[in-house]
Image (cartoon, coloured by chain):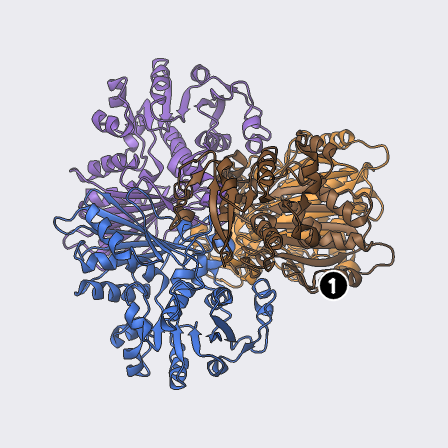
Chain colours: A purple, B blue, C orange, D brown
Amino acid sequence: MSKVKVGIIGATGYVGVELIRLLNAHPQVELSAIGSNSFVDKSITEVYPSVGIGNDMKCMKNEDVIKNSDLIFTALPHGVSEEFVLQAVKEGKKVVDLGADFRLKDEATFKEWYNVSFIDKKLHEEAVYGLCEHYKDEIKNAKVIANPGCYVTSISLPLMPLLKEKLIKKEGIVADSKSGVTGAGRGLTLLSHYPEINENMVPYKIGNHRHTPEIEQNLTDAAGEPVEIIFTPILAPMNRGILSTIYCDKAEGVTIEKIQNELDEFYKDKPFVDVLPLGQVATVKHVRLSNKCAISVHENKSKIIICSTIDNMVKGSAGQAIQNMNLMLGFDECEGLSTMATAF
Amino acid sequence: MSKVKVGIIGATGYVGVELIRLLNAHPQVELSAIGSNSFVDKSITEVYPSVGIGNDMKCMKNEDVIKNSDLIFTALPHGVSEEFVLQAVKEGKKVVDLGADFRLKDEATFKEWYNVSFIDKKLHEEAVYGLCEHYKDEIKNAKVIANPGCYVTSISLPLMPLLKEKLIKKEGIVADSKSGVTGAGRGLTLLSHYPEINENMVPYKIGNHRHTPEIEQNLTDAAGEPVEIIFTPILAPMNRGILSTIYCDKAEGVTIEKIQNELDEFYKDKPFVDVLPLGQVATVKHVRLSNKCAISVHENKSKIIICSTIDNMVKGSAGQAIQNMNLMLGFDECEGLSTMATAF
Amino acid sequence: MSKVKVGIIGATGYVGVELIRLLNAHPQVELSAIGSNSFVDKSITEVYPSVGIGNDMKCMKNEDVIKNSDLIFTALPHGVSEEFVLQAVKEGKKVVDLGADFRLKDEATFKEWYNVSFIDKKLHEEAVYGLCEHYKDEIKNAKVIANPGCYVTSISLPLMPLLKEKLIKKEGIVADSKSGVTGAGRGLTLLSHYPEINENMVPYKIGNHRHTPEIEQNLTDAAGEPVEIIFTPILAPMNRGILSTIYCDKAEGVTIEKIQNELDEFYKDKPFVDVLPLGQVATVKHVRLSNKCAISVHENKSKIIICSTIDNMVKGSAGQAIQNMNLMLGFDECEGLSTMATAF
Amino acid sequence: MSKVKVGIIGATGYVGVELIRLLNAHPQVELSAIGSNSFVDKSITEVYPSVGIGNDMKCMKNEDVIKNSDLIFTALPHGVSEEFVLQAVKEGKKVVDLGADFRLKDEATFKEWYNVSFIDKKLHEEAVYGLCEHYKDEIKNAKVIANPGCYVTSISLPLMPLLKEKLIKKEGIVADSKSGVTGAGRGLTLLSHYPEINENMVPYKIGNHRHTPEIEQNLTDAAGEPVEIIFTPILAPMNRGILSTIYCDKAEGVTIEKIQNELDEFYKDKPFVDVLPLGQVATVKHVRLSNKCAISVHENKSKIIICSTIDNMVKGSAGQAIQNMNLMLGFDECEGLSTMATAF
């Protein structure tokens, strides 16, 4: 059976290179083209000497990736993807967009947070939000996938089933999310400079991080009524991983056991979400280098506390994108993706 | 002027060795005796080759420290200090206890959380809780100081003035606290084993950490009515530092500016608490290796978010103990203590 | 085609759990039994909550692994493996021993360094030293493989072809090797305690590390005459990886280009050794989480400097063991092993 | 007694801010002026929010620092200091230059390595090389000090007494030096980007690092005849610290004990160099945040191995600069400098 040809637009950022690593191990696709306008005609070896070992594929112009691929991943800053996605769709290709351009359904909200308008409203209507465990059927038939944000994934997965079943109150939800530094990308900034973030911990964009409306869109969709969240992102001295500790209130008459049962039930057949038994705690180690989300549920006085961890570069980015691709192409959902974390 | 002789009981744990480092730089005291029942007759060099360079003081039995010192620091596990403190007080010596034995005023609560009873109730009544910025006058006249817990200090300092002035609601306060690994001490555990906690983040004792009743005692004292807290401690991959992100609700009619002003006002003459201007964020770097607490105030929808950072081994432990000693002995509060963090 | 049943004796140490991770992804074998005398009847989930997710295999007694497996990995401290290996061979099973028991061919040397004698001399004669790139043919027909030490692998791979071709002098070779902390295993020690090794770097066992005679055995075998090495191991604050910087002298009339060419030539068809082009530098990043060894050659005055990096837990341990298994079982040498490092 | 007014030119780099931290704790000087052409009229708080707490000194133009200070530290890239130093000397001020402009005595060598010529040859002749333990008398009378490089200090201190006494051979000396990332400064580079250097180790500038001629100048001066060195710098994932492992050969008839004795003897009255007893190993922990150099001596076959550690920002830079200042101003050599490392 011939392999499906997949290409990456924006291949030389951290998300792009993680896609290369994972696609390289995928048995049913062939990485046919990598695009990078900054490194045209350079081999990936020249950009990432370590990754590139034994892989001398050359970067082409982002535009050229489309015609060389059947399915395209776009890993670009917001506001830049839409044009490429439009072109790809015109040529009958499928797309998984790892940027933010198609994540928010409401144009006004998108404009408010990203200061960019939609170009093609119909395309936005057709694009499917790729949180695989919740929108699987739509994803299977999608042409364009908006791959979810990393923080968003860690927070939405545990909360959506609970809001849908009204087991927790929709008011006063707080998510305190600690992220590894790869989440800030390859671009040089003082915040990601080693001596600045090593032995440090830095909250940032408190109250105005762009993942907020995306989380709220998911929670609102699950609850069937508007839900808001208090979300605080924090940069932590590690390469990979997100730990979100989430605080919420039980609905009237609900016990922690009922909450645990609902999550157990909802995720029992979903290979990439592990709901830990009561008494265990989800840590970043549970998910490193895997496409898993680990969830643990706790109680303290009136509050339910949920620990939710993902590898921000896998389930929070390139891994979930491949999970989406697997669904779009009719492959086994787990193809090429690890369900086992590294112990260290 | 002759220097005051100070001794350390339990000198070879992490708290003890941090006391040695700080006392070594203090111009008005002389480290006269270090006790360690595990290392009697060994020099500190043999236990901490690095610290001990140039300091060949020998460990004596903990019992013997008392008679060799005018003021004694006890750095022992809970349930072990009280006997030494009793003995020291009998001999007319002053004590700063860095353990938990004298922190909780209510014996039933102490017994509930530590499973130990008070030995001498009168001594517990006389002991003063050493949160310097809040109990300065009592500390000056104290014989026995209960030095506050590390998490407790980071959470109590920003909240106490606000609760006292009723600027925030006393219900639903959440503190999500990230701590460096020295907080777990020198004892070998899998959790502190390098490959386990490096590149990891681990919530622990959710809902049952022993600092909870101590935080609540402080908040209740400030508010004048019972206050509870939801407190989640998390181990983070760094040596030193605590970042507490605290979530609370404004009282009716209160603005963030009013909250900021209250903290500015309350701490304006307190050399070890820095309330950052609105718009800045307190990070662990603000306080590393200093005796400072840095506080920043933020707003997100209905919630006030407070970031509060300390160095767990300085303001969270040995530094605050010396600040207490300074007050007890009539020294300048800042003597021997740094108000400037290291930049890296 | 039915899968080959493989078992692990000593499955709950760091090497064992890395074997589990890698074997789990191997398409042609089935992990049939895991042994751990410390955790009999416990599932791997109970020992490594993170790794075990979705894998509830129970530990059996080490003895019982043999009969449940066609090929057995032994991951035990030195002096403990031989008995198990003997038993396995008696039952007609193949073995890859990841400990030190079969690495040294000379019993006197073994006894000198490990203070243990050989039990079955014939078994030692039959055992094949599993440095795959150098002893491939013998490995294919072996019943028992002595899997090389981690430091040994990083130092032997670049030096052996050069000594064989007499391109470098056999006198005065120095290897300064920096290793991640997983190399010290899961056992709790002060040296691996997070606050002790984080922000630190610790040379240890200078002049008496047990990998020394093993390196010298390899170098001597390549040179055809006795070769000694000055080897200094250093613990570094990272989880995985070894960087050996090796200093040696060119033989009369030899240029760096000749050295580079020899390494290029020798390793050109070996999928797990990458000789970088002159001008590039091998770093730990080149090999993380892969089964690769990256080698770069440099010149400074009269000396040749070689940088050689491996992931100590993969090419330095579990990965090379699987590479050996692949050869023994007639599989593709690369089956189940990654040739691409993670970028972060 | 009035304090001496000291200023810093180039105060906002990492070296500058470390000077601020240390001078802030010095009892006999007053930080009178800080210069930074990039941040004129900004307070140090705006550049280093953490360090600046409680210190609202404003940056002035570098030119203006001279007239506001009695002694000036210049912390500038090579080729930029000399003009400022000339001006300062003209105005009768003393200078400690932390850059490279005055370190090399031979202009041809300087030009070869730095591609810059001397401006004022006489000034270069008068400038004193500030390796305090070796040139103390000259330093006391100097107007201009060339503060030694960090790697240079760690390598020269153990080797100079041995070469002077001809206890080791001058041929074939190798230094393999591992440095924390602050050594690369505050400037943003991919090499210092957190996800690139965390969990990594990177040799760089093998054979062409600019500290090489400076080390050789020191060793040659000590030996009384030309000495060359093979020097390999390696970036390691920690903030501070240098560990140099040095390999050399004993001179005919010399024992390790003789070498140990010589170092013991030479450094016995020097407060900032600790020669550890035979059998102990110098680690980065021995010196963190102190102005110490820790040295240990080992033997392996024919080689002597020396481990030498410093904190690159203290003894390797700002601390040694202050030690030089202390000598120049007639203060106690230890004033304001710590001889005790932090344990973590």
- Quadrant, the N terminus of chain C: top right
Residue behind mark 1 = D265
Residue A84, quarter of picture: top left
Side (left or right) of A47 relative to D106 = left
Residue A209: x and y, percent?
Answer: 30, 37
Q: Please rate how many residues cluster around mark 1, counting C-alpha atoms within 10 Å: few if below 14, some from 14 to 19, many from 20.
A: few
Residue B190: x and y, percent?
Answer: 48, 60
Q: What element carries label 1?
A: helix
Residue A179: x and y, percent?
Answer: 39, 43
Side (left or right) of C76 relative to C21 = right
Front residue of A298 and C126? A298
Q: In this view, does B276 lie above or below D25?
A: above
| Host chain of mark 1 | D
Front residue of B36 and A13? B36
Q: In this view, does C188 lie above or below A207?
A: below
Residue in view at x 44 percent, y 58 percent: B338
Q: Is residue C89 above or below residue A227?
A: below
Front residue of B76 and B280? B280
Residue D149 in view (yes/no): yes
Residue A279: x and y, percent?
Answer: 33, 58
Residue C321 in view (yes/no): no
Side (left or right) of B309 relative to C48 = left
Type of amino acid under label 1: Glu
Residue in view at x 31 percent, y 24 percent: A142
Residue B169, quarter of picture: bottom left
